Image: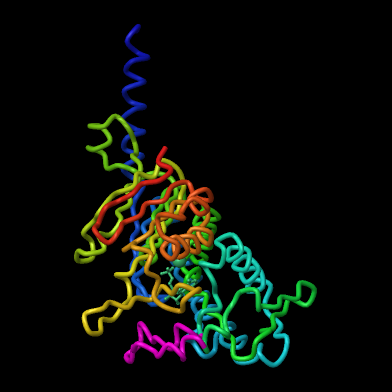
Amino acid sequence: MKYIKYILAAILLVVAVLGASLDFKVQKTEFMMDTVITAVAYGKNANSAINEVFDEIKRLDNLLNCHNANSEISKINYEASDHYVKTTDEVFALLKETVKLSQLTDGAFDITLKPVSELWGIGTDYPRVPDKSEIEAALLKTGYYNLELNEEEKSVHFKVPGMAIDLGAVAKGYAADRAVDILKENDVKNAVLDLGGNVAVIGKKPLKLFEAIKRGSFNKPFVIGIQNPDAPRGELIKTVTANEDIFVITSGSYERFFTENGVRYHHIIDPKTGMPAQSGLKSATVITKNGVLGDALSTAAFVIGEEKIKGISDLCLRVILTDSALNVTDIGKE
Ligand code: AMP
Ligand code: MG
């Protein structure tokens, strides 16, 4: 009789471990937002929640993509030089947030660089190195401080005619925020989302039965890989262990670029020069509690570089920089 509680405890343990192994996994990959998006989620609601996430990402791509002629951002770009353009509450909130992030990064992150990035055409079939005079003229049509936002009307106007906005540096982070909201609303406790280098983590990785028994634990933290900028996709330069819900967001010159006369021109523009940023970095990863913040700051960190990183690293849980010699600097590690 005195062994009964041990027997009960053993039965409970087996039931719990079996339960853990029944926390089944759903994985889905699609090409959206110009990148490969993979969602992995666990539990009984995982399948429907992931489907909802992909529907939402599709909606956001249609709303925010400045290369889609029918998006709300394109409508703003067509009309806001002439008059105030009424926006949805959602786009207005995002525009306001991006202006704040430009102020916080001293203009290193700036959604108004489209006139300059269009000259370069990186990511299109016709990339080219523009003349200095073209870049100078285009720079006159940039500057987040030239965005006029009317809070009451929820409308936007370009102070300088010919301006245009591009949310490419935050759209995936915003989509990651929305995806996390949806997963949590659906009571998904454990998930990882990868939006082409923008990773969001919820909870921990549930273990299969035998691993759980071996480790004496039902789960373990998710481990997020950071791409080696010089190696084929999937080869890592470092890993990050997610001990809490975080976003791990990377900007890198290896993502989109073209080469001319042996020089590599990539897609992240320094707003001060109108040239691809040359801060000595090959990639900048930031770890934050918010996707939009992380996406804007990873782009800004890449532009600013290691020397002046303090202003940005103070806003992040952690920053991991890879320089041109593939040296890795890890700032803010607990
Ligand atoms: P990301 O990969 O998040 O760093 O975003 C890069 C994309 O954002 C580019 O493809 C451009 O569309 C846009 N972009 C380039 N430079 C900047 C910048 N300095 N600030 C904001 N957006 C930028
Ligand atoms: Mg970004």
Residue 4 image point, x, y percent: 35, 13
Residue 33 image point, x, y percent: 42, 75
Q: Can residue 78 be found in the magenta stretch?
A: no
Figure quadrant of the C terminus: top left
Q: Residue furthest right?
A: 152
Residue 215 image point, x, y percent: 26, 32
Q: How is the structure coloured here?
A: rainbow
Figure quadrant of the N terminus: top left
Identify which residue is drawn at 25% across, 57% down.
326
Figure check: 198 above or below 13: below
Q: Nearest the camera: 197 or 45? A: 197
Q: Nearest the camera: 301 or 305? A: 305
Q: Nearest the camera: 250 or 280? A: 280
**Ligand 1: image quarter:** bottom left
Total numbered labels placed on residues in the image: 0
Identify which residue is drawn at 50% across, 64% down.
296
Residue 139 left/right relative to 33:
right
Residue 319 image point, x, y percent: 41, 51
Q: Residue furthest top?
A: 2
Q: Can residue 126 be found in the magenta stretch?
A: yes
Figure check: 282 above or below 16: below
**In this picture, which residue range is highlighted in magenta?**
115-136
Quarter of the image for residue 214 reads top left
Identify which residue is drawn at 24% across, 38% down.
211
Q: Residue furthest front?
A: 133
Residue 219 left/right relative to 246:
left
